[in-house]
C-alpha cells in the first residue's frame, strides 16, 4: 500500500494525526461534528507553582500522565500552565480512537492518575464528565487547533474545581461505567453557570455498584 502523505508542518501542529491527514486530503468539510466524549480535567497545583524553578518535575509528571492516558487510548488534548497550577485536558472518544467503553477507560485513567500523583507527593483535582460535544478545527492556514466545545467540557472543568485531592464525575459517566466500576454517591453541588444542583459521584477501584459516601 502507498504510504500516507505527510501533512505540511503548518497544518500538522496542534492537531491529532487523523485530523491532519484528513486536512491534507482536502476533507475540511468533514472535520466538524458532534461526538460523545469523556472529558477529564487534571489539575496539579503543586507543579504549577514550582514549574518555573523545577521544569524537570513538570516534564516528568506530564510524561507520566500522558503515558497513562495513552495506555487507555485517550489523548492529551491541551495543557495550560498559569498561577493556579498545571491543567491537562484529556479526552476519550476523539478521532481516531473511539470505544463503547470510553467512560470506563476515562474513569480507570483518572484512578491511575490519582495514584501516580499521590506517589509523587503532589496535590490534584480531577473532574470527569461524559456527553455530546462539538468538535472541529479553528484557525487559519498557518495554524489550526482541534477544539471541543459544549456543556460536557464546562462541567468537567467545574467538577475539577470542586475536587480537592479527589476525583469527581457526573451522572452520565456513572451510567456508562457502573457495570465495571464502583461509584460513591456524594452530596449534589451548586456550580457556577449551572442553574440546578449537579449530582456528583466518586469512582472507586472496587467491584461494580453504587454506594453512599461515608
Image (tube, helix red, strand yellow):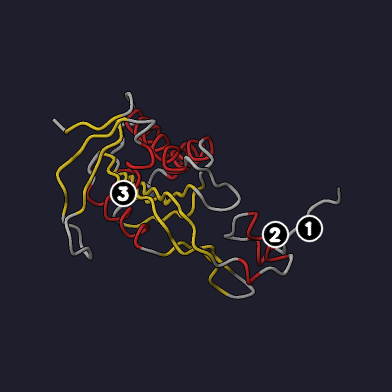
* Place of residue 212 in the rendered image (x, y in percent of width and height, measured from the top left): 17, 33
Quarter occupied by the C terminus? top left
In the picture, measured across the screen, residue 92 lies left or right of residue 155, that is: right
Alpha carbons under labels 3 and 1: distance apart: 42 Å
Seen as rendered, the residue at the extreme top is: 207
Q: Read off the residue under disc 3.
A: 49
Which numbered mark, 3 or 1, is in the foreground of this view? 1
Q: Read off the residue under disc 1.
A: 5
Q: Which circle's residue, 2 or 3, is located before the other in the chain?
A: 2
The answer to whether 172 is drawn above or below residue 111 in the figure is below
Q: Does the CB distance between marks 1 and 2 fall below 8 Å? A: yes
The residue sitting at 54% across, 40% down in the picture is: 73
Q: Residue 21 carries which label?
A: 2
Tell me the SS state at disc 1.
Answer: loop
Alpha carbons under labels 2 and 3: distance apart: 37 Å
Q: Nearer the viewer, residue 81 or 137?
A: 137
* Place of residue 140 in the rendered image (x, y in percent of width and height, measured from the top left): 59, 75
Q: Residues within 10 Å of mark 2 (few under 14, many from 20)?
A: some
The answer to whether 5 is drawn above or below residue 67 in the figure is below
Amino acid at each position: 500500500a502507498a504510504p500516507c502523505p505527510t501533512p505540511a508542518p503548518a497544518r500538522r501542529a496542534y492537531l491529532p494525526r487523523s485530523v491532519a491527514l484528513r486536512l491534507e486530503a482536502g476533507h475540511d468539510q468533514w472535520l466538524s461534528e458532534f461526538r460523545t466524549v469523556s472529558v477529564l480535567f487534571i489539575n496539579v497545583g503543586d507543579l504549577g507553582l514550582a514549574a518555573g524553578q523545577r521544569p524537570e518535575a513538570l516534564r516528568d509528571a506530564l510524561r507520566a500522565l500522558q503515558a497513562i492516558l495513552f495506555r487507555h487510548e485517550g489523548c492529551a488534548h491541551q495543557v495550560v500552565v498559569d498561577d493556579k497550577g498545571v491543567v491537562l485536558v484529556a479526552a476519550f472518544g476523539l478521532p481516531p480512537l473511539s470505544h463503547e467503553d470510553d467512560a470506563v477507560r476515562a474513569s480507570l485513567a483518572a484512578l491511575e492518575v490519582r495514584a501516580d500523583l499521590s506517589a509523587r507527593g503532589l496535590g490534584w483535582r480531577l473532574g470527569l464528565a461524559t456527553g455530546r460535544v462539538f468538535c472541529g478545527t479553528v484557525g487559519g492556514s498557518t495554524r489550526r487547533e482541534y477544539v471541543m466545545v459544549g456543556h460536557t467540557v464546562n462541567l468537567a472543568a467545574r467538577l475539577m474545581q470542586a475536587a480537592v485531592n479527589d476525583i469527581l464525575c457526573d451522572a452520565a459517566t456513572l451510567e456508562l461505567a457502573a457495570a465495571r466500576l464502583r461509584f460513591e454517591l456524594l452530596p449534589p453541588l451548586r456550580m457556577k453557570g449551572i442553574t440546578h444542583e449537579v449530582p456528583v459521584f466518586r469512582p472507586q477501584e472496587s467491584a461494580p455498584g453504587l454506594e453512599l459516601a461515608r
